[in-house]
Every structure is written in C-alpha cells, then in structure tokens.
Image (cartoon, helix red, strand yellow):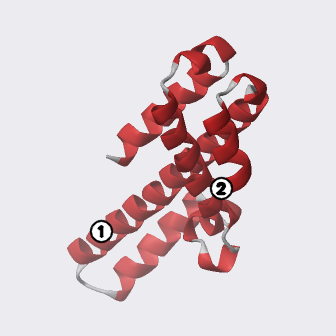
Amino acid sequence: ILHAETTIVSLLTLLFYREDYVLEIDNAILLSIVDYCARQMSSLAAPISDNKMVYQQKNPYTVDQIKSKALRQQHKSNKIHKDNHMHLIDEIRRNLLNTEYQTSVKATSIARYLCEHFDSLSISIQSRIINTH
C-alpha cells in the first residue's frame, strides 16, 4: 500500500507543477491534499531521536556495513536460516522507512506548489492553509 501511496504522491507532484491542473481539482479533494501534506510535513519535523525515518536518512548503512553485520550474526549462531530471516526483516524495515521518507519529501513539494499557486486557490483552501496549518 505504501508504494501505491508514493506513486500517487509522485503523480500529484507532477500535476501540481502546473497551475491550470491544480485549478481543475475539486475543492474537497484539494482540502484533503492540503491536510495530507501537513501531516506528512509534521512527520518530517519530529526530532531525529524520535523519528526513525529521518534518523535513517541521516545515518544510512553502507552495503559493507550491512554485509559485515549479517556475517557477524551468522558466525555467532549456527542458525543461519534465522539470521538470514532477521537480515531480510531489517532490510524490509529500512526500505519501509526510506519509502515513508520519500513520500513525505514529495508531499512537501506538493505543499510548495500549492503555495506557489496560492492566489489562484479558493478562499476555503487559502483559509485552511493559513489558519489550520
């Protein structure tokens, strides 16, 4: 589901680049998008110590670190299958956090485009951006 969300946000980023596409979208949908962007940006604003998504971006593992960690785990235990399973779970978690981060950054781009086209947006959307978020 997260990959579908990221794909949709990427498409919206492309659409919102042009003002005429933004103006064609229904106000109720735009209000939902404004709220979504605000939630995504607030997830980026959390302190690094509490935000695994941002922490991973600031301190990524290199490929060599990942391999050496996996080898150390395999040597410590005779249960190679269990270690490989844990390695795969760690990789899935890192990919999940990376995808969440990319989605949040793209939502920030959408918010930027909405602010660029601010004067053309309806009063209700302008009010939501200014007063609520």
Q: Which mark is residue 84?
A: 1
Q: Nearer the viewer, residue 49 or 43?
A: 43
Q: Where does label 2 land, which residue?
A: 132
Q: Are marks 2 and 1 in contact (CB under 8 Å)?
A: no
Distance of label 2 from label 1 (alpha carbons) = 47 Å
Residue 105, percent from left and from top: 64, 46
Left or right, 127 with respect to 97, comes to: right
At mark 1, the secondary structure is helix
Rendered position, 85 above or below 38: below
Judge the density around disc 1: few (<14), some (14-19), many (≥20) Cα neighbours within 10 Å.
Answer: some
Residue 115, percent from left and from top: 75, 35
Q: Nearer the viewer, residue 16 or 105?
A: 16
Rendered position, 42 above or below 70: above
Decide if residue 96 is in sight here.
yes
Please report the residue visible at 36 percent of the width from the left and 38 percent of the height from the top: 4
At mark 2, the secondary structure is helix
- Can you say which quadrant of the picture contains the C terminus? bottom right
Amino acid tagged 2: Thr
Residue 15, percent from left and from top: 57, 20
Please report the residue visible at 51 percent of the width from the left and 70 percent of the height from the top: 68
Amino acid tagged 1: Asn
